[in-house]
Amino acid sequence: MATRGTNRASEANPFRWIAFRPEDRSAPEGGGGGPKELVPVTPQYRASLNASLAEASAALLPEIQAHPSTPGVLILKLRDIAVAKTHRPNTLVAEAGLQPAGVGRIDEMLVAANAASILSFSQTILHRQTQAIKANLSAIQRIDAWDSQRRMEVPADQLRAHGSILLTLFRYHATDATARNLDVLRLLMQQRNIQAEVIPQRWGPPVFRIDAQGLSEESFAALTKFPGLRAIFREPIAFPSATSGATLAGPLPAPIPEANHPIVGVFDTGTAANALSLRPWIASTDTYVLAIDTDYVHGTAVASLVAGGRLLNNDHTLISPTRCMVHDVCAMESGFAKTADLVLRLGRAMALAPQVKVWNLSLGSAPISNDEFSWFAQQLDALSDQHGVLCVIAAGNYEGTPRRGWPTTALLDDRLSSPGDSVRSLTVGSVAHLDGPGALVNAGEPASYSRRGPGPVFTPKPDLVHAGGGVHTPWAAGLTSMQVLQPDNTVGSGFGTSYAAPLVTGLAAHVWQSLDGQPNFTVKPHMVKALMIHAARLASPDYAAAERRYFGAGVPSDALATLYDRDDCFTLMFEVMVVPGYKWRKTPYPIPDVLMRNGRLQAEVIITAVYSPPLDPNSGAEYVRANANVSFGVLNGNRISGKVPLEGETGTTGYEATQIEFGGKWSPVKLHRKSFPVGVAGAQWAIQVEALLRANEPPLAEPLNVALLVSLRALDGNGGVNGSGIRALNSANWLHQTLPTRVPVTV
C-alpha cells in the first residue's frame, strides 16, 4: 500500500543537477526532400506577381533616387504555408541580387533593393524556370513597399503632436550597407539641422530620439521618406502599476543583523526618508530623479513588499516569508516617465551595481502588439544580457470598462503592457489573495486589473502571477487589498500588478542566492527563471489555454519549494548544450519504480525548459532566432516517441495557426505536462532536446544553453517517490549533485 507523502517541500529532498556531458550529444537522423511548388507558377501567376513588384517599386524609387547610397525595402508577403524556414524564397532573393533585410510580421520577409536589383528581380520573376526558383515564387503572394506609411506607427500629425519620437534603422545582412545607411541618415540630419539624441543598441545601429514638434514640416517629411528607416514611433510613456487606498498605522519589522538576506534592485520612484521602518532594509541608493519630481509613494510601497510583504499582510500563507534587502534606485518620476530615459538610467544603474542580480520593475507602458515585440522590451532584453541579470516586470493594469470578473468571456482591451513582452524577463500578473464583501473576484482568481497574455505572436505571457491586492466595487481599495508601507511610515492598502511583481522578485533573489557557490556551476538568469516557473507549475493546477493567458504558470510557492521536492515527487534539472544539426539525449531515464505498474508509468510528468536564444529586433515577428524542441518519451530503436505534449494555444486554421506554429512554439519558455492515470507502457524512457535556427540566421557563436526541469509526481500521494527516484538515479550512474547550496533565509 502506498505511503502518503508530505504535501510540503522538504530540505531532505533537494533537486538534483545533471551537468552537460559531450557524449550526450549526437547527430539526428536525416530526412526531407527538394523544393516543391506550393501553387502552380503559371505565366499569369508570374505576371500578377510582377505587377505587384511594379507598384511597390513606384513607391520606393523616388526615395532611392533621393538617397542613392541607401536601398529601399520590399516586403515579400508569404503564404501561410510558406512561413516555414524550408519554404523561404532565399534562392530567388540571391539570384535577383537582393539583400535580406529582416522580417516584418510573421508572414513578411523583407529584402533591400536598389534600381538595378529591382530590374533583375522583375526579370527573374518573369523568366527563370529552375525548380528552385519556381518553388520560391510559389511562396510569395504579393510584393509591397516598406514606404513612409509603413514606417510611421501613426499618421504624421499624431507623431508631431506627441513630440518625442524614436527612429530605428534597418540592419542589413551586409554590415557595410548598414554602416552606409547610418552615415547617410546622419548627413541628412546635419544638412537639415535636426538635433537628435543617440541611444546605442546592443543589437544593430543606434536609435535616435527627436523632438518632432521642433521640426519644420519639410524636415519631418524628409525623415519619413528616408528609405533606410525601419520605424518612426512615439516614444512610449511608462507609469507605475498600482493604485493607492486608505491608510492604517503600523511599521515594518527591522532585519535580523546576522541574517544573510539577498539584495534586490528596486528601480522605481525611490523610497521616502520618513518611512523609518524601511530604512534598515535599504542596502544602498542610486538617484536619477530630483526630489521635486517624485513623491516616493510607489517606490516605498514596492520596496516594503520586497523587505517584508508577508509581515505587512498578516502572515498570509500565499506570500513567502523570505525577505530581501533593497538597492533603492530612484529613477522614475511619480507621474510618468519617458521610456528612453528609463532605459538609459537602468543601464547606468545596473553597471554601477554588479552585485545586484535580480531587478524589480513595477511599471507599464502601452499595450503590446500582436506581431512585434515592443522597443521597451527589446531594451530590457539587451540590458539583461549585457549585465547578466534577471528582471521581474509587472504585467500592467487594465482599468477600463466593463470591469472584468472571473470567469470572463468578454473580449476586452486588457492585453499585457510593454515591457511585459520582454522574453528574457519574468512577467508577473496578479491574483486576489483574500475574499471579502464587495470584492470583484474571489481569492485565487485573476485580479480584475491584471493584464493578460499572450505576448506577440502567441508567446506565452505572463510567466507567473502573485498576490497583488483585491479591488472592490466600484473601483477602490478595501479589505482584500494589499497592505504596503507609505512615505510617512504608516501602512496603506492598494492594488496593482506593481505589488505582485516584488513578491516574485524577492523569491527569485533567494533562489539565485541559494544556487550561488555550487562547484562547477555558474548561476544564469534563465536558470532562475526556469526554477521559478517550474515551482509555480508544481504548485498550480494544469490550466487550460484560455486560463493560462491570465494565470501564466500560476503562483510560485515559497523559495524552499522552488529548490526542494515533496516526498511524492522526483525532480531533475539538466544542463543542456545543444546546437542545430545535433540532438542532446539522456537515456535510460531513471524512473522511480513505485511509479511503474505492470510495466506502465502512472504519474504526472511536468517539464519546463528555459533558454536565452539569440535575438534580433530587425526580424520583427521572428525576433527570437533559435528554438529548442523538447521530447520526453519512450525510445524505439534510435527514435524517441514523445509522450508529454507541449502546452500552448489551441490552433485553428490559416494565419492564426501560422502564428502559433512559428510564434508561440518559438518561445524560449517551453511547458510540457501530462498525467497518465491508467499508465503508459515503455521499457526505456528518454529525454531529448534539439535546436533549430530561423531562416537566414548565422550559425550560433556558442551552443544554446537550456535549463531543463523534469518532475515525476505520484497521482496518489505516494511518499516513496523521491527516495525511489534517487535510487534509480544512482543506478543509472549519471553524474549528479544537489542543486541548492543553502536553504533560503526566512527570518
Image (spheres, rainbow, N blue to C red):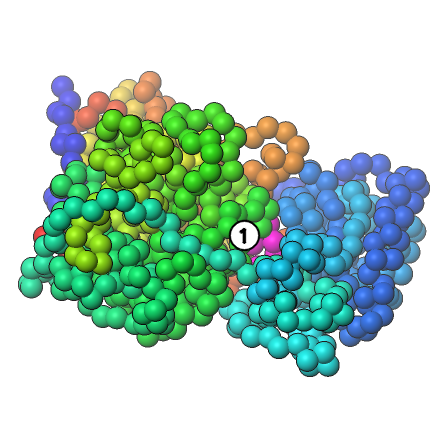
Foreground of the two, 308 or 322: 308
The x, y position of residue 640, in whole percent, is 46, 36
Residue 441 placement: quadrant: top left
Density class for disc 1 (Cα within 10 Å; few <14, some 14-19, many ≥20) is: many
The x, y position of residue 704, in whole percent, is 45, 56
Residue 620 lies in magenta, yes or no? Answer: yes
Residue 66 lies in magenta, yes or no? Answer: no
Identified at 14% across, 30% down, the residue is: 5
Identified at 59% across, 40% down, the residue is: 659
Q: Which residues are magenta?
A: 616-623
- Mark 1 residue type: Phe
Q: Would you say residue 387 is visible in this rendering?
A: no
719 relative position to 482: left or right: left
Viewport quadrant of the N terminus: top left
The x, y position of residue 556, in whole percent, is 27, 41
Residue 113 placement: quadrant: bottom right
The x, y position of residue 29, in whole percent, is 55, 44
537 relative position to 726: left or right: right
Instruction: Provide the residue designation for mark 1.
Output: 373
